[in-house]
Amino acid sequence: MKIAIAGAGAMGSRFGYQLKKAGQDVTLIDPWTDHVEAIREHGLQVDYDGQLDSVEIPILYPQEVTESYDLVVCFTKALGLDAMLANIKPALGEHTRVLCLLNGLGHEKTVEKYVPAENFLIGNTIWTAGLDGPGKAHLYGSGSLALQNVVPGHEEQAKEVAELLDQAGLNATFDPNVRYSIYRKAALNGCVNGVCALLDCNLGSFGSTDSAPVIIREVVSEFAAVAAQEGIILDQPEVVSYVESIFSPDSIGEHFPSLHQDLVQKGRLTEIDFINGAIARQAVEYGFRAPYCELITLLVHSKEQILGAK
Amino acid sequence: MKIAIAGAGAMGSRFGYQLKKAGQDVTLIDPWTDHVEAIREHGLQVDYDGQLDSVEIPILYPQEVTESYDLVVCFTKALGLDAMLANIKPALGEHTRVLCLLNGLGHEKTVEKYVPAENFLIGNTIWTAGLDGPGKAHLYGSGSLALQNVVPGHEEQAKEVAELLDQAGLNATFDPNVRYSIYRKAALNGCVNGVCALLDCNLGSFGSTDSAPVIIREVVSEFAAVAAQEGIILDQPEVVSYVESIFSPDSIGEHFPSLHQDLVQKGRLTEIDFINGAIARQAVEYGFRAPYCELITLLVHSKEQILGAK
């Protein structure tokens, strides 16, 4: 199977590396010049739990893509997905399956502009990875991956892709409830990501305030209301407990969520439109409001502008 | 008429000074030791538009109050009003009129615990003043004051108080629509005060963001919904224009609102419960929600706790 990884950052590099080592025909696609040139010159260098390795993997700029693939795995930043798909149209043939593994919500609308729904797979992964520099991926810890088809009746194609990824050591499974997991994880991010950026604090600091339980309950209920419109019934008390479980210093309480890192630490535009913003937009489409998500999104966008984020 | 000024900070000192100079029998009441002792030793020292002056005015600690007054003018911080009234109960006789000039909303419930509604006057002032240190008030610019009775049928008493204050040069008038002005001013503060503290920015910076018009429209509509329950029909487009007019550098765009000063600059607890918090509480009492005001209040309280505000 001819596979392309659209977005070869930390996670895309992990998937590309593991698939290549498993003998697959895999090509990376990325727009970052230094990264592309480093991989062309030295191969993809990998620190895998302390073991150094490198593999030759072809890597293309999006504009260089000329032929179609059997499978395209999307691992761009949320803000880069649309441009990536627009630039790699030749990769997307009539039978190309596209697996979207981005965090957050609302990517389906982007993918559906370029890919027929029956070829579209969605997934949720808890693998992690980092980049130590252009061409240098840092892979650590264990993880897993669940995926499913978007259109009912295409389970077999989804299972085939899951098996292929599983054979590359990615602990991949077919799971007919992936959308539930996606909503649950997005709700977690919706409770803490924007708020910690606005309050300029780590997870534990926010979690220790008297306002946190109220904000979490309201945000989770807004995610649940939108999910319910899509036939997904979130177990709200369980999701609230899940959110509250991360505040302990024994968990990731001392961690600053990614949106804080992007906005406050690096002055970058955030993915808020794919977390709380997606809920706010969907709610309006379904005929109601998600005001906590609306205001968190509006305030994060204000902060982006005030800080001159790019 | 025997007058007490409950809360002799900047504004209380201005009123005390002007009333004393107009020949009234006026007593200051304040709990701040350095301020009380300075005024007892040196009188109240005033820089009035560059002119230095000082007057002897009696000043009491709240606990020292033993006799009743004809008029008590409340000028405490919002968070200090309840304790002040509880401590000066002897000042509040059967016929004592109490004029509340605090910014924000929700003070009526506090005053009504100590004062019969028919003796209660509410007002709204645009006078300004500062304290240069204990016992030293700084009075500048011009201003005015509007007041009205809370219970219909007590207009004459309100007019009498307005006339007395007007004779002291305070440009005081009786105005049957003071509640409208109070809501309009509170809505302004509700749009910018908490938000600028959360975004750590001045008025103009917030006003220049794309989110500002949306946030302002929603917050004004929540203030209007609560005001409507009290028979006050806010002209929402006018209030929105009023809020937007302050963002220009020619207006007060470069100014950091008081809540930013309190929380971010001085690490103090804020008056948010008497601005957005009051609307959130009242909305629930009236059977609906004011979610933007709720979340602004919750986030400001989180920030207070994270900063260890006192």
Image (spheres, coloured by chain):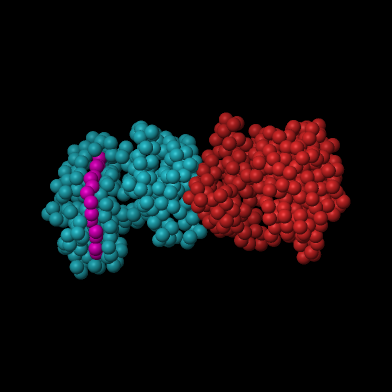
Chain colours: A cyan, B red
Query: On the rendered structure, is A30 left or right of A201?
Result: left
Residue at the spot 73% in from the left edge and 37% down from the top edge: B89
Residue B276 place in picture, x, y as percent? 59, 43
Q: Nearer the viewer, residue A95 or B208?
A: B208
Residue A148 place in picture, x, y as percent? 25, 40
Residue farthest toward the bottom in the current orientation of the protein: A41
Q: Nearer the viewer, residue B192 or A84?
A: B192
Count of picture labels: 0
Residue B185 place in picture, x, y as percent? 67, 47
Residue A140 within the magenta-colored segment of the rendering: yes
Residue at the spot 72% in from the left edge and 50% down from the top edge: B8
What is the span of residues highlighted in magenta in the rendered image?
A135-148
Residue at the spot 30% in from the left edge and 62% down from the top edge: A31
Query: On the rendered structure, is A226 left or right of A53?
Result: right
Position of the C terminus of chain A, as image quadrant, is bottom left
Q: Quadrant of residue A41?
A: bottom left
Query: On the rendered structure, is A207 left or right of B2?
Result: left
Residue farthest toward the top in the current orientation of the protein: B287
Residue A133 place in picture, x, y as percent? 28, 65
Residue B117 within the magenta-colored segment of the rendering: no
Q: Nearer the viewer, residue B217 or A240?
A: A240
Q: Nearer the viewer, residue A77 or B45?
A: B45
Residue at the spot 47% in from the left edge and 47% down from the top edge: A296
- In the depicted structure, whether residue B32 falls above or below residue A54: above
Residue B27 visible? The answer is yes
Residue A280 visible? The answer is no
